[in-house]
Amino acid sequence: MPHQAYQIDKMISAKQIAARIEELARDIRARFSDTDKLVVVGLLRGSFVFIADLVRELDLPVEVDFLEVSSYGNSTESSREVRIFKDLRGEVEGRDVLVVEDIVDTGHTLTHVMNLLNARRPARIETIALLDKPSRREVPFKATWTGFEIPDEFVVGYGIDYAQRNRNLPYIGKVRFTEE
Ligand code: IMP
């Protein structure tokens, strides 16, 4: 449970998210139009809402798989460890892969995930992140597609949590701490 009281200010509406996902899905369909073997890999838990909406816009033969990793260590260190909590069920060797993430923040998580998955020799691998906070980067990372660039704010909703709460908000909101 969070210790401090907070309010949530709406930042990106459900309608804006849906419209952006339609655009992104068009680009993704074009990029993978030749594939008969796309594996869409959602990073748990934050991407579960995004991946559900995205794959329903894709109109491609897709498989859906999930990977749960957690990065820990001092956030000011430039090399944090990333631990696998839940690995993929399927193989990605020789397959086309789209990795779906909620937010790229410091860049550590996706950098490690890409190293891990590239070592399994996929035919092609691309990444999509709903949100990107470029000003927070500690290691260079650029997703193939980004939904929205946002400033350095702590956000929740649409799958994204604060202390495991607020994942079920239909929009993205920014957390504003208030006096008790
Ligand atoms: P990073 O790019 O390795 O720093 O980590 C990205 C992960 O940090 C995301 O998948 C989120 O789980 C978490 N994260 C980063 N920023 C926020 C935020 O504003 N709200 C909630 N979780 C966040």
Image (tube, rainbow, N blue to C red):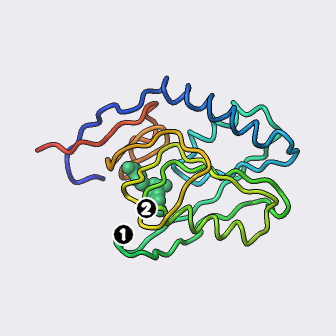
Q: Quadrant of residue 137?
A: bottom left
Q: Of residues 64 and 128, which is closer to you in this image?
A: 128
The residue at the far top in this view is: 15
The answer to the question of whether label 1 and label 2 lie on touching residues, with beta carbons closer than 8 A, is yes
Please provide percent x and percent y for residue 25.
67, 34
Q: Is 17 placed above or below 134 here?
A: above
Label 1 CB less than 8 angstroms from ligand 1 = yes
Residue 99 lies, with reference to residue 169, above or below; the image says: below
Any atom of ligand 1 within 8 Å of the CB at mark 2? yes
Whichever of callouts 1 and 2 sits on the residue coming sooner in the sequence is 1
SS state under label 2: loop
Query: Closest to the observer: 153 or 88?
Result: 153
User: At 36% from the left edge and 69% from the top edge, which residue is drawn?
Assistant: 75
Q: Which residue is mark 2?
A: 106
- Image quadrant holding the C terminus, namely top left
Give amino acid for label 1. Answer: Ser
Whether residue 176 sits left or right of residue 13 in the image: it is: left
Image location (x, y in percent) of residue 79 = 46, 76
Measured as percent of width and height from the top left, residue 172 is found at 41, 36
**Front label number (1 vs 2):** 2
Residue 60 appearing in the image: yes
- Give the residue number, with chain letter if any, for mark 1: 75
